[in-house]
Image (tube, rainbow, N blue to C red):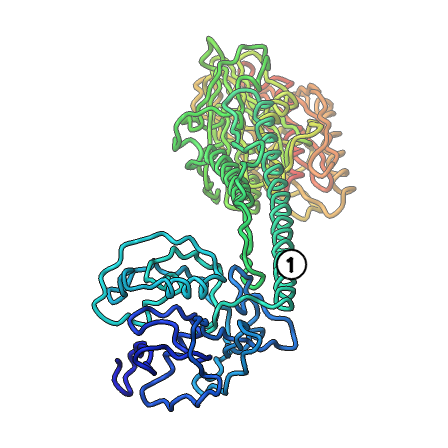
Amino acid sequence: MAQEGSSAPRRALGPLPEEPDAPTGGRFGRAFSPDEPSPLTSTGQLRRLAASPSSPASPVDPLDVRGTTPVPPPAPVLPEPESALPASAGRRFSASAEPSEFISAAPRRSAVSVSSPPSPPDAFLPPSPRPSSASVVTNPPAFTPSPFAPSPAASSPLASSASASAVGSYPRSVPTAPTAPSSGPTPFGALGEGVTGAGTPVASTPSSTSTPSGTPEEPLSRRGQKALAKAEARSAAQAKKAEDAAAAEAKKADAAAAAEAKKAGAAARKTEAKARRSGKGTPVAAAVPSEPPAATTPPPVAATAAEEPRRRTARPALIIMAAVAAVVLLVAAGVWVLSLRSGAPSGTPTVPNTSSALDPLVTAADLGTVGDVTWTEATGTADAVTPTCLPATGSGLPSPSRSASRRVPVAGSDVDALVQVVDTYADEATATQAYGLRLTQAGTCSNDAVWITGASAVTGLADSAEAVKLVVQDQASVFHTLLISRTGRSVSLVDLATSESAVNALDVATVVGKALSRQCGGDLGTCPSSIEATTEVPPAGDPAGWLVEADLPRITLGTGRWGATDPFTTLTIPGSQCEGINLETVSGTTSAAQRTLLLADDESAPQGFGVDMVVYTFGAADDASSLSAKLTKNISGCSDRAPTATVADGPSAKGTGAADTAVSGSTWTVTQKTATTTVVYRVAVITAGTRVVYLLANPSSDYDFTDAQWKAITLRAGQRVTQS
């Protein structure tokens, strides 16, 4: 018995005896002895629990008669609301309902006897509060017999019959189990629905839903059963709708992921196909699954309409992960390809040798039979080589972000080879600056043995490209074709050397185009297409507008070195004595300047052998033409005026300079004899726009330029002057 005011639950009280020998009949009659467990329903137990020793005595019942037949206690009668009863109002295995659908748990009137009068007002059971949320589904704990329950021997047939009647509305399997001997009154909490009147435990069936506290589980009326059926049908429809929506969502995600995977697969196949077309090397391919990986969809789980979980599948996540993996592999392949171009400035090894189908450098396969020689395969990307006339560093030349270089040799030759360097810069503007400086290097060429013999403009190869032909005048001449091109941020320097004859610019450009096609497109620059080469002026040298050392050939192969003075404006040019005017004080000019080039380190050369170049600039082309015509006339008729002079006409020079400026002139060989000596002069006069160029060389009878060489020097002088 709990103390007054205690929060501990009140223990059940045994029935109060009304007569010592016989039970009282009527509605309040007792059908069982005080020592026997009560078979009352949960409502009856609550009613008994609500009673206390201080409760007033029951009113005298006029129908209180001696009972001969045990009558079960009254079953509660729940009032029926205007609306249909919810599914969880007292029916087991029902769907949950909204909290507003619950009704009061007041006891129902007994339906056992038609003649039973209405029960008096019950002041012990206040209406139970309506629940504010869906009830939580829990499984009842396993039944443990109370140590205070009476033994089966204490139960009479009358008690067994009454107990069966009380629980007959809920069929259960009743396994027998031993119970502890009775040692006291049975607590009220031990008399659950899993206990028979004799105290035998009954296996309880877990309920899918729980009823509000204090609400007895009683059969529903016909109206309640209809409402329950409607609620269950509505729950099933909502569950089906949620399942269909989840299936549609999964199908849509599968389709999107499959499309993404297909796109990634197509990109990978395209990359692989491009690698295979390029020839040698190991193609880079991304492993892309041909089909999305299968995923197992979990079976649908039944749930209430209020708590239906959103169904998901693993298929979309797996497909997206596969697509992302494919993209990562493609990006990794691209980074690996770009690493082939990494390195230091030209001529400095930075990366190991490697071969790839995406090789940015020219290969032996690209060269084929160019030069009518057999090229040897080379796979280096950091060979310590530099093209002729193009040093790794120079004044104002920016340093590349990375550099790749290679030398492709010819079988059985130490001379024939192709050297290529590809410098990549931080941006296109820097690459353009480097390209211009490289052209100046090629147009000047500080190599003492080099003679620049020609140049070509190349179109259709890259963003910009130009070729220069050189001859290295050693004991055995070696012919070089330089090709300088810019593609996006990369500048390619190619030097193809042969010992037989120079390879024309178009053939070299075609070979280089095969390599450029592997590093172009988009922001990487223009790709080769319809390559053409046309003759043009060699790139401007330093200083621009003047002949440079590489414009003059050696007289003796393998010997001699040309040097030049800076241009100066105080003219010191005596001439050949056939010009008929003072060359140092020509009138009508806006400017006049001179540069002298001298040959050194050749013992066979006459003392002070060299070439003087004088440039007269006028305000109009007619004034320039007038001076040119006067000089030409005077030199050609020199032998008529001076008996000691002999004049021989040389080849005429005619061509096109920069900006399509017409260049034309004449050459002569003038010999002046005296009583003791003979002096030989090479003379040339050429006109280019508003400028007149006068050339004077001092050879000897046995040490001189050839007519072809002097003609080339004359034409080059006229072309150079148009570049300033």
Above or below — where is 542 with respect to 215?
A: above
Residue 67, image x and y in percent? Answer: 43, 76
Label 1 amino acid? Answer: Ala
Residue at image position (30%, 53%) is: 177
Q: Can residue 124 be seen in the rendering of this structure? A: yes
Q: Observer-nearest residue: 527 or 56?
A: 56
Above or below — where is 80 with respect to 511?
A: below
Q: Observer-nearest residue: 263 or 607?
A: 263
Q: Observer-nearest residue: 602 or 440?
A: 440
Q: Residue furthest left?
A: 183
Residue 522, image x and y in percent? Answer: 63, 41
Q: Residue furthest top?
A: 412
Q: According to the image, label 1 marks what residue?
A: 233
Q: Quadrant of the C terminus?
A: top right
Residue 348, image x and y in percent? Answer: 39, 32
Residue at image position (37%, 83%) is: 51
Q: Looking at the rendering, which quadrant does residue 716 occupy? A: top right
Residue 256, image x and y in percent? Answer: 63, 45
Residue 677 relative to residue 248: left or right = left
SS class, disc 1: helix
